Amino acid sequence: MNETEQLLEQVADRVRDSAQGCGAPLPKPLADGGIARAEGILGFALPPLFAALYARVGDGGFGPGGGLLPLRQIMDAYAARRASGWRWPEGVLPITDFGCATYACVDCRSETAQVLLFDPNLGDPDLAWSIDTPSLAGWLRGWLDGTAWFCDESGLGEEFDLEPAPWAEFRSRI
């Protein structure tokens, strides 16, 4: 079993365990062809790990923050943000809502599916984008083992040195 398969198993186990603990139903994976339809609508491919989460684990509702958004909601949010006054980069999908208009986003054009943090509360579009984690796999591992900033129960990340690196590619992607 390769690292991606192991990570998918760990995420599925965590989802299953937490669903059993609270009596909530497991999120259902997307039906066959759901990923291909989404990619056709978006006009670009989803990173393999991201697609596998939705096809094999469930259509959102699990993961960091309030959980991954359902894929349809991600697609709608992407389309709305691309049409809004904020210059939204091509190929960057909002995947988790941390509240106060702050989102974790996956860069579908990145080899590692890097996770970006979008915080419009900073006021300037150039400052709103930073790199959260260099890869989606690393972001998920931080959630699984409780070492990521968003795992801090106070929600403020006080135990972490939160000096996010600005995302240098922002200007070239709008």
Image (cartoon, grey):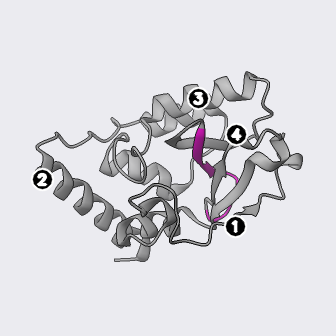
Q: Position of residue 146 (x, y in %)?
A: 38, 69
Residue at 74% across, 22% down: 83
Counting residues from the start of the chain, the first of labels 2 and 4 encountered is 2
Q: Earlier in the sequence, mark 4 or mark 1?
A: 4
Q: Secondary structure at mark 4?
A: helix
Q: Nearer the viewer, residue 130 or 6?
A: 130
Q: What residue do we see at 51% from left, 64% from top?
A: 149
Q: How many marks?
A: 4
Label 1: which residue? 163
**Circles 2 and 1: CB atoms closer than 8 Å:** no
Where is mark 4, residue-wise?
121
Query: Which region is colored magenta?
Result: 102-112
- What crowding class fits label 2: few (fewer than 14 Cα within 10 Å), some (14-19), or many (20 or more)? few
Left or right of 96 in this view: 45: right
* First in residue order: circle 2 vs circle 1: 2
Label 1: element kind:
loop
- Residue 21: which disc? 2
Please name the residue that numbered disc 3 is placed on: 77
Callout in the foreground (2, 4): 4
Of circles 3 and 2, the one toward us is: 2
Name the amino acid, label 2: Gly
In three-dimensional space, the C-alpha distance between marks 1 and 3, rounded to whole angstroms, equals 27 Å
Amino acid type, callout 4: Asn
Circle 3 SS class:
helix
Amino acid type at mark 1: Glu
